[in-house]
Every structure is written in structure tokens, then in C-alpha cells.
Amino acid sequence: MTFNKTAIIAGALAISATVSVADSARVGAGFSMFGPTVEAQIPLTDSLTVRGSLAAGLSATGTTTADGLDYSVDATIGATTLMATYHLPVGMRVSGGFLMSNTSINGSVSSGGGDTIGGFVIPSPFTVESTTEFANSISPMATFGFDIPVLGMVLSTDVGFVNTGGFDVTLTETTATPVISAVDATALSTAEATIESELSQYDYIPYFSLMVGKWF
């Protein structure tokens, strides 16, 4: 029994000893919800670090249907984060900071007329392009995770949320002969507001990451 208690205590100490001011920096790489990610971390004390990450490299194209119309979609995903992390016993950590989004979703839709976009009926043929981005240029975020020593390196996880502030939607008519302005000068802004209202349920989105790093 004494051996088991000693082993448990030693294991807990080993797991918690993932931060030390004797180390100058930790660099890592892995994956987050914003794509392939690299991270750098520096210790301020034995329990407090500052870390930043850069995620990029994911893009996708495809089609989606809304209001009976087929939209061509081109999405680019990426983000930069800066967080302060407090390291708790047994490898637990709590982080808070900010995320600068490099994520945007661009789309286009064409119609022969009589269709609805953003709740507004367009009677004539039209082509509209859209851009959707985080409303917050700098989004607050918070995460909870673990640092786990593995073969001289550190496996780290984060799970939390990002406050996007909702989404900004921009609609632009690209038809050679404008028809929306002739119907209603505020048609596009009305449609934008309608779509933004529908997306307001995503003021907070989940965040996760899985990284492998090493102290130097």
C-alpha cells in the first residue's frame, strides 16, 4: 500500500512539472478547429505562461441550398490566438485570451427571378455575392485543458469557447444590369440584417485543440 501511495504521489508530481521558469520556451504543433496549428509558449512563473498560436491552411469549396437557391461556397479557415494560461496541479490548465479570426465564407447565387434571398423577393434575374465573417475582429476566448508529459515531450489539449459576437454578412449584386436597387434601395441591407439575425445563435462557438510540444 505504501508503494502504491508513493507511486501515485510521484506520478502526480511528474505530471504537474510541465512548467518551469528554468525553461525558456515551448514550441508545438498540432491541430485545432481552425486547422493545422503551431504554437509558442513562454513561462512567466512556475504556474503561469503566455502562449500564442497560428492556425491556417484549411479551405473548402462546394454548394449549399437555402430558400430553394443553390449557393456556390468558398470557405477559408484560420485564426491567431494569444492567451494567458494558469497551470493547476496534475497537469490541468485554464486559459483566457483573444482570437483574431482569418476565417471567411464567400458565396454566390444566381436566379432567373421570383426567388427569395434573405427574406426579400427579387422579381428579376440577378446574381449576388456574399461574404460572412466574425462580427468581432478580436474575439474573447476561454479554454480548459491538460498537459501530459510523453517521452520528453508534452501532449496538450484545449476545450472551450470563442465569443464571435455573431457574424457580419455583406451582400453585393454583381449582375450587369442592377435589379435589386431598382426594386428597393434597401433590399440588400434588409437581407443582410435578416441573415445576421438568423446567425445570431452562433455568438459563441466551441474551440478545441490537440498539440504536441517540447520545452527548450
Image (cartoon, grey):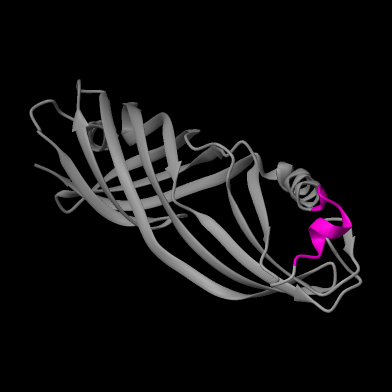
Q: Could you say which is closer to the camera, residue 195 or residue 206?
A: 195
Q: In this view, does 70 lie to the left or right of 205?
A: right
> Can the viewer see residue 135?
yes
| Image position, residue 28 (x, y; %) | 23, 50
**Position of the C terminus by quadrant:** top left
Above or below, comparing residue 123 to residue 137 in the picture: below
Q: Could you say which is closer to the camera, residue 184 or residue 62?
A: 184
| Image position, residue 174 (x, y; %) | 66, 67
Q: Could you say which is closer to the camera, residue 170 or residue 4?
A: 170
Q: Which quadrant of the figure has residue 202?
A: top right
| Image position, residue 125 (x, y; %) | 82, 75
| Image position, residue 158 (x, y; %) | 42, 43
> Can the viewer see residue 12?
no
How many marks can you see?
Answer: 0
Query: What residue is rendered at 42% in x and 65% in y?
Result: 58
Query: What residue is rendered at 45% in x and 36% in y?
Result: 144
Q: Which quadrant of the figure has residue 46?
A: top left
**Position of the N terminus by quadrant:** top left
Query: What residue is rendered at 74% in x and 49% in y?
Result: 192
Magenta span has 20? no
Above or below, comparing residue 131 to residue 186 in the picture: below
Instruction: Specify the farthest residue to the bottom.
Output: 112
Query: What residue is rendered at 9% in x and 33% in y?
Result: 24
Q: In this view, does 1 lie to the left or right of 118?
A: left
Provide the residue span drawn in magenta.
178-187
Q: In this view, does 69 lie to the left or right of 140?
A: right
Above or below, comparing residue 47 to residue 101 in the picture: above
